[in-house]
Amino acid sequence: MLASVFGDSNNARPAAVSGEPARADGRVDPLGLALAIVFSGLLVVQIASHDMWRDEVHAWGLVSASPTLADLHANLRFTGHPGLWYLLLWPATFVTDSLYTIQIVHALVGVSLIAMISLVSPFTRLEKLLLLASYFVLYEYTVVSRSYGLGFLIALVYAQMRATRPDSVYANAILLGLLANTNLFAFVLSGAFALEYLIALVFRRGRTLWPALKAVLLPALLYVTLVAAAVATMWPSPDISWRTTGVPLAYAGDVNRFLEMIAGSVEALIPAHALYHWDDDAESTLHALSIAALPVLAFVLFLIFKAHRLLLIIPALTFLGTVAVGQLVYANSIRHWGVNFIAFVAAYWIRRVWSPVPSHFATGLLVVSAAAGIAVSVQQWSRTFSEGRATAAWITANGLADAALVGTPDTLVAVVAQYLNKPIYFLDCSCTDTYLHYHKRRDAFDESQIAERLARASEELSGRRIVFLINDPLSDDERASLGERGVAVELLATFDKASTDENFYVYDLRAAAPLEAARGWELRPGSDPQEPSRPANPRE
């Protein structure tokens, strides 16, 4: 009965794609191979020019500070993320200390994702081209080195297995369990996949309920075990800091936030936001039209999957889960909302294996996403994603690599320290670390304490040359307060062209009296540290 309600989602065998006969000899489609080569080459070029952002480098700092798996698990409990991406990076730390290892590993994931779409997917050549050019494949989940690309890849492997080998229940359970261990939003997607798969297995036509339940019991236990491992890793430590994300449930009743989470989830499939998603100075990327478009999007998805209505569970449950996480845990952004795009693509993948006729509605959604993907990819060439790498390179070029680093806010300045591969003294916790450890020791800090804590840092690091990093120029009041504490600062360089918030002002920090006449060191030729006119400072 349930099967008749949701449509025929039985285990149909793969059929030829309309207009593109399946190759019985197993040969690779030449055009598909060409697409894989072209887009893989574009990925390598883009990722090589990409300046890594704080969440990208944080993963490397965490695994580098985890000599054992027990240490890795303990450190992960301060992030709210499961461990698969970190486990992938962790062995590399025993071979190299290069931060760029993250991009090499992620490039391999990205190339694998591109190959899956180009060479394995059941899509037409046009659908493949549009999907490869979409925002999440062309940029967000391939160029930005985080766990989301790994989750996308596993989701597509599962979609192929679900469509062609539904009776491989143990393999599929493992894939779903691995997906749950990539990130919190893939965890939600994994649950949506699992529910659809369970219903399809249990209520398959011609099967009685009890034998069907017994057949899926052990694979289900295997899946639940992997899910439990993800929960154990994500479960926050009692000492975790909530300062950056906000305390869970604090905004549960916020209607504006609820509408924002809905709009963002819609825009993952119908981009209506500013072309450059990461522009910190752009106007709000969310529009009332996005919320109004929700019924239209729901109807379009129904039309796409009407012959296999059980598959609607996948995008529907993912949408609800994404909104719930944003409302109850922490506010989402484009990289999080993109799980809705993954859910759509994976469900459509399964549907296309079972039904070879393409959907014009699905093609339309892919066209919109491809337009956004191409626009963002083009724009990123003229924008600096983060000034962290440039700031670190300047510090090294000017002979300051051995100076003690001090900085705030810790979320941003940690990027420069990790590019330099050296520890930094965070004002936020009045402590030194090699990466940002989200410990509650940082929660008592606010910007009004900058002068006080900077003076303390100067005293604790007495005898060493000190370079101070901050993302806004110091105000006149802060300079005066430092002077009263016997500390003088001089602006050496400004890096303020980032499209994110990762801009940096580099200061020389010294005791005011003894070094008033001369610093005792010089910048290299061509690096005049004359102080530029300062932009408006919200602290002034």
Image (tube, rainbow, N blue to C red):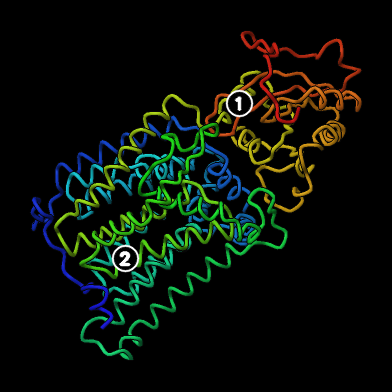
User: Disc 1 vs disc 2: which is toward the camera?
Assistant: 2
Q: Which residue is mark 1?
A: 391
The residue singled out by tag 2 in the image is 312
Q: Is residue 127 above or below residue 346?
A: above
Question: Around disc 2, counting alpha carbons within 10 Å, would you say few (fewer than 14), some (14 to 19), or many (20 or more)?
Answer: many
- 357 with respect to 520 (left or right): left
Q: Quadrant of residue 190?
A: bottom left
Which of marks 2 and 1 precedes in the sequence? 2
Query: Going 59% across and 33% down the picture, which residue do you hit?
Result: 502
Residue type indicated by callout 1: Thr
Question: Label 2 sits on what residue type?
Answer: Leu
Which residue occupies the foreground of this view, 513 or 269? Answer: 269
Count of residue discs: 2
- Tag shown at residue 256: none
What's the residue at 83%, 25% (across, down)?
A: 477
Q: Nearer the viewer, residue 356 or 362?
A: 362
Question: Which sits in the foreground, 83 or 476?
Answer: 476
Q: Residue at x 39, y 83 (%)?
A: 217
Q: Which structural element holds mark 1?
A: helix
Give SS at disc 2.
helix
Relative to 209, does residue 222 appear above or below in the rendering? above
Task: Name the quarter where the C terminus is drawn.
Answer: top right
The residue carrying pointer 1 sits among few (fewer than 14), some (14 to 19) or many (20 or more) residues within 10 Å by Cα, namely many
Name the spot of residue 497 as percent of width and height, x first.
Answer: 55, 24
- Nearest to the observer: residue 21 or residue 360: 360
Residue 77 screen position, x and y as percent: 63, 59
Kindly identify the residue that appears in the image at 11 percent across and 58 percent down.
Answer: 16
List x then y, in percent, for residue 121.
23, 54
